[in-house]
Amino acid sequence: MKKMSIDIISDIACPWCAIGYARLERAMGQLAPEYEFEVQWRAFELNPDSSGDGEPILPALARKYGRSEDELRATQNQMMTVAKDLGLNFEKIQERLVCNTFDAHRLVKWAGEQGQHTGMKKALFEGYFGRAENVTDHDVLLKCVEVLGLDVTEARKVLDSEQYARVVREEEARYQKAGVSAVPAYIINGQYLISGAQEPDTLVQAFQEIAAESD
């Protein structure tokens, strides 16, 4: 059995992070008989200063990237097609609002202690891209907790406090310092960087090459 650790640097507000993980799951599934993967989710914020919170996503992205709303709508239509083929719900990707995800990242850390960090991440992706829910809203976050069967009272205590805030901030600073400026990014075995939402076959090949170097 070949063991491989994967640190996934991602943001809940990043559609390619959701697509990237679905592709990663497929790659891990292909290698499952002989590889054992340990996944850790690492925090990254696309909108760390909360600017534009609540603004419709298309005009916000048009301003940020200097592109037209029509161009961005076409890009997001392509994303919806890709997502559908992967079994992801992106139905409301164009109806979502700009959201700060700091509290959502804190909740992922908490859920990780119950063995549900991936479950929480997926629930947040579905809420944001599938239902255009405001993932800054604590009630929305607690609904994700409930769906996963975790303790809503405990989760509310986390959200009402500063728990995990330092962990999230330190993590974000560490990966920024390491040069990660776009997500998703995967760090394999603490030393190999794979950037972007790569196709499953590309990931399989990369993992095989890394494993061969480690032999």
Image (tube, grey):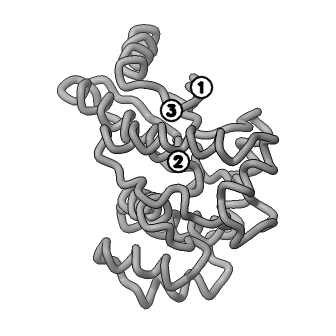
Q: Position of residue 5 (x, y in %)?
A: 44, 35
Q: From where the camera sits, is residue 38 visible?
A: no
Query: Is residue 213 at all visible to an observer of this figure?
Result: yes
Residue type beneath disc 2: Pro
Query: Which residue is denoted by mark 1 in the rendering?
Result: 193
Q: Earlier in the sequence, mark 2 or mark 1?
A: 2
**Label ID, residue 197:** 3
Distance Cα–Cα, label 3 vs label 1? 12 Å
Q: Element at badge 2?
A: helix
- Tell me the SS state at disc 1: strand
Q: CA distance from mark 2 to mark 1?
A: 20 Å
Q: How many marks?
A: 3
Identify the residue shown where x is 76% and y is 40%.
67
Taking 78 as reference, is 94 above or below it?
Answer: below
Residue at 22 percent across and 23 percent down: it is: 34
Q: In front of the other: label 3 or label 1? A: 3
The residue singled out by tag 2 in the image is 15
Give the quarter of the image for residue 25.
top left
